[in-house]
Image (tube, grey):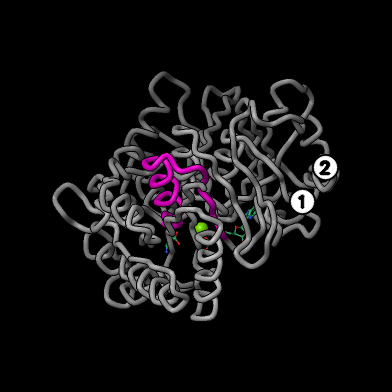
Amino acid sequence: MGLLVQKFGGTSVADPERIAAVARRVRDSRQRGDQVIVVVSAMAGETDRLLSLANEIVKNPKGRELDVLLSTGEQVTIALLVLALQALDVRARSLTGSQVRITTDAAHNKARITNIDTKRINTALSEGEVVVVAGFQGMSESGDITTLGRGGSDTTAVAIAAALKADECQIYTDVDGVYTTDPRLVADARRLDRITYEEMLEMASLGAKVLQIRSVEFASKYRVALRVLSSFEDGPGTLITSEENIMEEALLSGVTLNRDEAKLTMLGVPDRPGVASTILGPVAEANIEVDMIVQNVGDDGTTDFTFTVHRNDFDTTISILEKISAELGARAIEGDNKIAKISVVGVGMRSHAGIASRMFAALANESINIQMISTSEIKISVVVDEKYSELGVRTLHSEFQLEHA
Ligand code: ADP
Ligand code: ASP
Ligand code: MG
């Protein structure tokens, strides 16, 4: 008998039939003798629907009231799922984030979990109930409803698994595991049996939206055995685990695509100390995160300073640069929000040289020009024109033969 946290995403609870199917899956786990805490997302499309409603009232809604609104999606699903479980004679109880006492900081719309009170869950479990918790939501110290950022139900599930020291945290979704790349992009993408926390963290950060980044951070920090599985078919899924649990190390584990970034360049800035901080200081003050940075020094003593930000921050960043451009004596500002970042990820890179040159040669072979490059110990990212997104991903996936185990 084990203690399991099972999380079901939006498509897995999209309509009453699917909710009934989830209830049957949970019942089967109970019949095998497991104790189960279920975490659910809002029904597919519901969070987007609520967001666009708010958008009809104000442009770019945010803050406290947006969280009051968005958290309703998950509250609907917990009630429906408990009704479905009760219809199967499974004893169950729904709990919202604040009923559990999932405490977060006060950063509305992107709050971080700071504590989970396990009392109420443990009491219900010891009374033989399945506990169904609303994902994506918590409560700040001052008692306000908060949400954890898009995809945040994954993080609710992993955080509960960590707090309860569950045997496994199972993320049920619409694919049967983590693939070498998004299976919707490359038909011969291959399901991975296992992947390290570190690689999964890079993949999630670089654009693989199958798990929210923070859920992987939590899992890694608290060593939660995390598994991604299909809610529609049975199978082993993908286990996300520590490196010592992985026998055969592949060279690379995946290719990711991120179309969420935009590129900005300040041309002809005098090459002198302090320039980078003069440019990036005001950007940071506006709470805008900078990802890649490149600086080229020309022979006329000026430099071109290029960096990327989230596409949503593109316009704001341009206007910040316009303000400081005169002060810096820059020649011009260029912006491009039609870029894509393609990355290859794998712990095998630590012990194998030559991956970067193979990557660049494969892209060159397809006449894909590389605009920026960044590397870490286990990943290489390039920025290319957005129109090469799919071709680039497919080219690298086959160059490194990721379709074969
Ligand atoms: P849920 O609603 O269950 O949380 P998500 O849509 O958040 O599901 O995540 C599942 C989706 O992630 C898949 O449908 C798939 O298109 C996408 N995805 C992106 N990269 C990968 C990858 N490397 N492996 C598996 N799925 C991926
Ligand atoms: N319902 C939220 C979203 O759509 C949280 C989640 O699904 O994980 O982002
Ligand atoms: Mg998700």
| Residue position marked by numbered label 1 in the rendering | 190
Residue nearest the viewer, comparing 363 with 85:
85
Which stretch did the figure color magenta? 150-172
Residue nearest the viewer, comparing 34 with 185:
34
Please give the label number shown on residue 94.
none
Residue 300 visible to an observer of this rendering = yes
Left or right of residue 377: residue 77: left
Left or right of residue 230: residue 397: right
Quick one: which residue is furthest to the left in this view? 142
Pick whichever of labels 1 and 2 is earlier in the sequence. Answer: 1
Left or right of residue 329: residue 366: right
Which quarter of the rendered picture does the C terminus lie within? top right
Q: Residue at x 66, y 52 (%)?
A: 237
Q: Residue at x 37, y 44 (%)?
A: 288
Secondary structure under tag 1 reads loop
Secondary structure under tag 2 reads loop
Counting from the top left corner in percent of width and height, residue 401 is at 84, 42
| Residue position marked by numbered label 2 in the rendering | 405
Residue nearest the viewer, comparing 278 with 192:
192
How many numbered discs sit on the rendered protein? 2
Ligand 2 lies in quarter: bottom left
Residue nearest the viewer, comparing 378 with 137:
137
Name the kind of residue labelled 1 in the image: Arg
For label 2, being within 8 Å of ligand 1 is answered: no
CB atoms of marks 1 and 2 within 8 Å: yes
Name the kind of residue labelled 2 in the image: Ala
Can residue 171 be found in the magenta stretch? yes
Task: Note whether 135 is above or below 330 in the view shown.
Answer: below
